């Protein structure tokens, strides 16, 4: 039952994020359809690989398959940003409040805490990832509202953004060092559950998406026009 609920929640979050980001840009109808199709294909590929155990321990030798997928998604996003000017122009159009509000979905990190309570994920990985995501998601609620009204200082967004990035980096590091069958395992217990469906969608899809969002927020904060409060809500 928990896996079913997790599947529904994760797919719904992916759909909301895709709609939020695509809807916030001035993409033509054809480009929007292409964006949704791209997300759908990546999701389908992850599900297909996960269904046959392709993310399990040892599936890709000593290097965790989950890590390969995570960094492949990050690399794809960064390459598109730096090598495709039109893509860069479009994503920079996404308003700051939208980028912040997207992180509200990270309250679903409560599933990590539930899995930990059920003995399916170990400490310190699950408690750190769970509480960190919940905290970042809850703070995003008032922060997004203040950014929309232009009543927040950029420094508060920067601090929250740093916290969000640190949470993701810590979660990835603890997840890798909790994986059995790899030379990177440091902690006892096994985080193997995160390599199975539906939970594998978190590190292979949601984590890179949120990390790229944080990088985009950082870029907009550094832009001259993002200094004013009015620009934050534009």
Image (cartoon, rainbow, N blue to C red):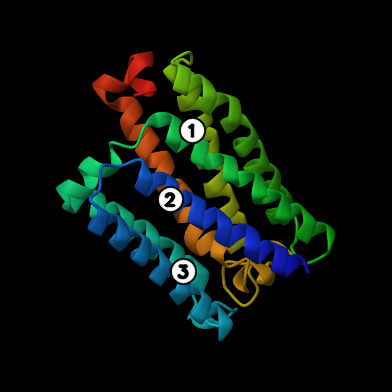
Pinpoint residue 163: horizontal percent, then vertical percent. Answer: 55, 34
Q: Which residue is mark 3?
A: 43
User: Residue 178 appears in which quarter of the rendering?
Assistant: bottom right
Residue at the location (35% across, 48% down)? Answer: 22
Confirm or deny contact between disc 3 and disc 2 (CB under 8 A).
no
Mark 3 surroundings: few (<14), some (14-19) or many (≥20) residues within 10 A: some
Residue at the location (46% across, 22% down)? Answer: 147
Viewer-nearest residue: 130 or 62 = 130
Residue at the location (52% across, 48% down)? Answer: 169
Mark 2 surroundings: few (<14), some (14-19) or many (≥20) residues within 10 A: some
User: Residue 201 appears in which quarter of the rendering?
Assistant: bottom right
Q: For the C terminus, which image quadrant? A: top left
Q: Earlier in the sequence, mark 1 or mark 2?
A: 2
Q: Which mark is residue 161?
A: 1
Mark 1 surroundings: few (<14), some (14-19) or many (≥20) residues within 10 A: many
Confirm or deny contact between disc 1 and disc 2 (CB under 8 A).
no
Residue 139 falls left or right of residue 160: right
Label 3 and label 2: CA atoms lie apart by 15 Å
Please identify the residue farthest to the bottom as the structure is shown.
52
Q: Earlier in the sequence, mark 1 or mark 3?
A: 3
Residue 149 falls left or right of residue 191: left
Residue 43 falls left or right of residue 133: left
In front: mark 3 or mark 2? 2
Label 1 and label 2: CA atoms lie apart by 22 Å
Pinpoint residue 110: horizontal percent, then vertical percent. Answer: 72, 49
Secondary structure beneath label 3:
helix
Secondary structure beneath label 2:
helix
Residue at the location (37% across, 61% down)? Answer: 36
Q: Which residue is mark 2?
A: 19
Q: Earlier in the sequence, mark 3 or mark 2?
A: 2
Residue 77 vertical placement versus 39 (above, below): above
């Amino acid at each position: 039952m928990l896996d079913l609920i997790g599947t529904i929640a994760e797919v719904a979050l992916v759909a909301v994020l895709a709609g939020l980001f695509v809807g916030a840009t001035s993409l033509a109808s054809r480009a929007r359809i292409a964006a949704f199709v791209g997300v759908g294909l990546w999701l389908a590929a992850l599900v297909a690989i996960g269904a046959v155990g392709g993310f399990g321990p040892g599936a890709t030798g000593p290097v965790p398959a989950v890590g390969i997928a995570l960094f492949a998604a990050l690399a794809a996003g960064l390459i598109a940003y730096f090598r495709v000017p039109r893509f860069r122009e479009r994503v920079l159009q996404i308003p700051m409040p939208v980028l912040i509000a997207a992180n509200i979905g990270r309250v679903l990190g409560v599933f990590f805490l539930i899995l930990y309570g059920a003995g399916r994920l170990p400490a310190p990985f699950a408690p750190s990832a769970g509480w960190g995501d919940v905290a970042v998601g809850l703070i995003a609620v008032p922060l997004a509202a203040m950014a929309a009204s232009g009543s927040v200082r950029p420094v508060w967004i920067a601090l929250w953004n740093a916290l969000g990035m640190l949470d993701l980096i810590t979660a990835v590091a603890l997840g890798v060092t909790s994986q059995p069958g790899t030379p990177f395992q440091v902690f006892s217990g096994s985080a193997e559950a995160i390599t199975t469906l539906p939970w594998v969608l978190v590190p292979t899809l949601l984590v890179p998406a949120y990390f790229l969002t944080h990088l985009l927020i950082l870029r907009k904060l550094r832009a001259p026009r993002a200094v004013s409060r009015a620009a934050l809500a534009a």
